[in-house]
Amino acid sequence: MFSIAKICNCRVLLVVMMLSALPCVAQNWSDWSGPKGAARLRARVLDQDLNAKQHAAVVEVEVQNVFLHHPDFVEQSGVQEGILKYELDQCPAILTTDTRMTFQQLPSGSHEIAVGLLGSDNRALAPKVKLQVSVP
């Protein structure tokens, strides 16, 4: 399942993919953000060189010790709940439970993609992970 939306004046096409059957060459994961045993996340850019040539970036995220859910769901498990916050450069943030995000139509140059993990009260559960992408 996926959805497509244009965001802000950045003229970037965003594709959100919940599950992807597309094979991706793995890149290195960032370090875990947050203390061991607490809610934390890590992220990586997939197929960075190939996607950059196509003016795109695919980000994959993993979380620990937290359930990702739609923000309207009621907490029932006792495990902390969270939502991911993706930020590309100066564009508005995207809040979602999707652990794979594709940004398309990126202009040439350097871009920063920040991924945060927020609790149900919109407070950060772990420090943001910042990824750099360079588009030729």
Image (cartoon, rainbow, N blue to C red):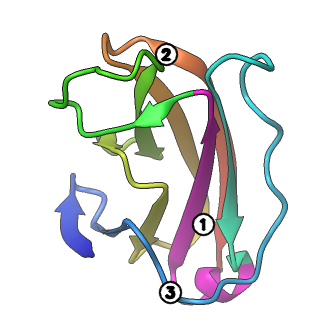
| Quadrant in the picture for residue 9 | bottom left
- The vertical placement of 50 against 27, above or below, is below
Indicate the amino acid at tag 2. Answer: Ala
- Would you name the residue on which mark 2 appears? 124
Q: Quadrant of the C terminus?
A: bottom right
Q: CA distance from mark 2 to mark 1?
A: 29 Å
Seen as rendered, the residue at the extreme left is 72
Q: Position of residue 19 (x, y in %)?
A: 43, 72
- The vertical placement of 127 against 58, above or below, is above
Q: CA distance from mark 3 to mark 2?
A: 30 Å
Tell me the element at label 2: strand
- Would you name the residue on which mark 1 appears? 109
For residue 83, which numbered disc appears in the image? Answer: none
Q: Quadrant of the N terminus?
A: bottom left
Q: CA distance from mark 1 to mark 3?
A: 29 Å
| Residue stretch rendered in magenta on the structure | 49-65
At x 31%, y 58%, the residue is 10
Indicate the amino acid at tag 3. Answer: Ala
- Would you name the residue on which mark 3 appears? 21
Indicate the amino acid at tag 1. Answer: Gly
